[in-house]
């Protein structure tokens, strides 16, 4: 894929965010290849709590969140120390802003556990020394389109999860991104790009460049190509 990546630092960190099933992993691979960056993925296989969590939210939510926090912190630190450009397929900020809070609000995590988790997150992440992304790419779409993708990839623990869980998660993402201000945000609708189309990926890369080169610009939304061309 022949992509013009001028203006994007060789050690930039581009982080993707979005609810389950929006296509973070596919876009992570595509952008890493286009930018000649390394890719960094959320550890799902080998997670000792994930299946237990989907079977019993109340018992395992705190354990799962602590595991994710520790793994993502180690991942972030390792990427920063290499001095290499990375595309990362999930942000650490979603952990506290969405997932831990959802478990607490739904009475799946006690107040004591939630406060312990928040305290640990703030000590580890909310520090001027913690490396922040240069751009966060937020991938969005309609709930029905997203659930269609979840069904296609066929993970049993996800397909057996009630729709009410996905609806709650979807709403929380909408609210979270409105208040997110850690770094500039490039907002992509799942209908606005095609990972197999170099022209489409060039538009995404151009959006990243625009945000990096214009620090005063904190938000940019890429419209679907047919809309953008009108």
Image (cartoon, rainbow, N blue to C red):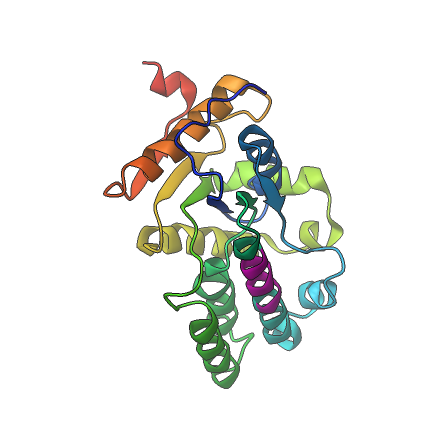
Q: Looking at the image, which is closer to me, 72 or 11?
A: 11
The x and y percentages for residue 84 are 55, 45
* Residue at position x 63%, y 53% in the image: 42
Vertically, is 17 above or below 49? above
Residue at 50% of width from left, 68% of height from top? 100
Give the magenta-colored segment's residue range: 70-78
Task: Tell me the quarter of the picture where residue 21 sits.
Answer: top right
Image quadrant in which you'd find residue 97: bottom left
Q: Is residue 49 rendered to the left or right of residue 120?
A: right
Asked whether 214 or 65 is in front, the reply is 214
Q: Please state, as top left, top right, bottom left or bottom right, where the C terminus lies in the image.
A: top left
Residue 45 lies, in percent from the top left, at 75, 55
130 sits to left or right of 77: left
As drawn, the residue found furthest toward the bottom would be 112
Nearest the camera: 189 or 123?
A: 123
Q: How many marks?
A: 0
Q: How far across and down, in percent of the image, does residue 65 sit?
A: 58, 69
Residue that lies at the very extreme toward the left in this rendered image: 216
**Residue found at x 36% / y 65%:** 128
Query: Left or right of 223: which side holds 35?
Result: right
Q: Is residue 123 left or right of residue 79?
A: left
Does the magenta-highlighted stretch encompass residue 117? no
Name the residue at 41% across, 24% down: 224
Secondary structure that dominates the magenta span? helix
Where is residue 162? Give x, y as percent: 62, 55
**In the depicted view, which residue is nearer to us: 81 or 112?**
81
Looking at the rendered image, the quarter that the N terminus falls into is: top right
């Amino acid at each position: 894929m022949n992509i013009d990546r001028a203006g994007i630092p060789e050690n930039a960190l581009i982080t993707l965010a979005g609810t389950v099933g929006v296509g973070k992993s596919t876009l992570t691979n595509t952008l890493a290849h286009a930018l000649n960056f390394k890719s960094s993925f959320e550890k799902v296989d080998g997670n000792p709590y994930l299946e237990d969590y989907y079977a019993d939210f109340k018992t395992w939510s705190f354990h799962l969140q602590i595991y994710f926090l520790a793994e993502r912190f180690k991942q972030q630190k390792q990427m920063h120390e290499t001095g290499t450009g990375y595309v990362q397929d999930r942000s650490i900020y979603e952990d506290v802003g969405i997932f831990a809070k959802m478990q607490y609000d739904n009475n799946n995590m006690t107040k004591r556990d939630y406060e312990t988790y928040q305290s640990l997150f703030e000590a580890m992440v909310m520090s001027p020394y913690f490396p922040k992304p240069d751009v966060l790419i937020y991938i969005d779409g309609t709930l029905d389109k997203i659930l269609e993708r979840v069904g296609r990839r066929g993970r049993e623990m996800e397909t057996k999860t009630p729709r009410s869980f996905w609806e709650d998660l979807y709403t929380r993402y909408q609210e979270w991104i409105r208040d997110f201000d850690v770094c500039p945000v490039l907002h992509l609708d799942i209908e606005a790009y095609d990972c197999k189309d170099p022209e489409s990926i060039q538009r995404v890369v151009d959006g990243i460049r625009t945000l990096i080169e214009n620090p005063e610009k904190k938000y940019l939304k890429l419209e679907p190509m047919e809309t953008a061309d009108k």
